[in-house]
Amino acid sequence: MAMAFKMAVTGMWVTEECKNSFMEMKWKKVHRYIVFKIDEATRKLTVDKVGGAAASYHDLAAALPEDDCRYALFDFDFVTVDNCKKSKIFFIAWAPSASRVRAKMLYATSKDGLRRALDGIHYEVQATDPTEMGFDVIKDRVNK
């Protein structure tokens, strides 16, 4: 099996580590969140940070840099109105205002390829500041 999945649009590579971390989140529930980073020199997408099963959404928000772009996944557990436990995976495209224009463009053009490589994402949130990805935004999405 190939060591990486190439994103057709930008030539960006999604490492096996990224896909394996996602599968561990999706099926084994060992990660609450995963933060991905593009290494511009090698053109590879790598795992920047992970949060264990006990981590919170606040922990994810705190793990994102104030001045650089990232992709993040968050596994949101909730209970439906008919008392069923559910879980939905959120994809967050983080592009703060203080990040470089080049980084914003690179992350924007690579996003769809990553989403295709990681099958099973339920919702997407794009944020340029913390209020655009607040916990209330996440809760509102699953309640619609």
Image: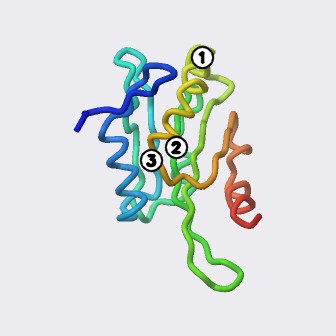
Q: CA distance from mark 2 to mark 3?
A: 6 Å
* Mark 3 residue crowding within 10 angstroms, few (<14) / some (14–19) / many (20+): many
Residue 85 to residue 112: above or below = below
How is the protein colored in the picture? rainbow
At label 1, the amino acid type is: Arg
Give the secondary structure at mark 2.
strand
Q: Position of residue 105 (x, y in %)?
A: 60, 19
Q: Quadrant of the N terminus?
A: top left
Q: Mark 1 or mark 2: which comes first in sequence?
A: 2
Give the percent coordinates (x, y) of residue 119: 48, 49
Camera-side residue of 21 and 5? 5
- Looking at the rendered structure, which numbered label has been put on residue 34? 3
The C terminus: image quadrant: bottom right
Image mark for residue 100: 1
Q: Can you tell which quarter of the image residue 81 is in?
A: bottom right
- Going from N to C along the chain, the mark reached first, 2 or 3, is 3
Residue contact between numbered discs 2 and 3, judged by CB atoms under 8 Å: yes
- The residue positioned 40% from the left and 23% from the top of the image is 39
Q: Residue at x 36, y 41 (%)?
A: 18
Image coordinates of residue 21 in percent, x first then y, are 35, 49
- Spatial CA distance of label 1 from label 3 is 22 Å
| Between 121 and 52, the one nearer to me in the picture | 121
Residue 104 drawn above or below residue 137: above
**What is the three-letter code of the residue carrying label 2?**
Ala
Tag 1's secondary structure?
loop
> Can you identify the residue that label 2 sits on?
72
At x 47% / y 52%, what residue is drawn?
Answer: 33
Q: Is residue 91 above or below residue 141?
A: above
In x, y percent, where is residue 80?
66, 78
Q: Which mark is residue 11?
A: none
Q: Residue furthest bottom?
A: 82
Residue found 63% across the figure and 52% down from its top? 123
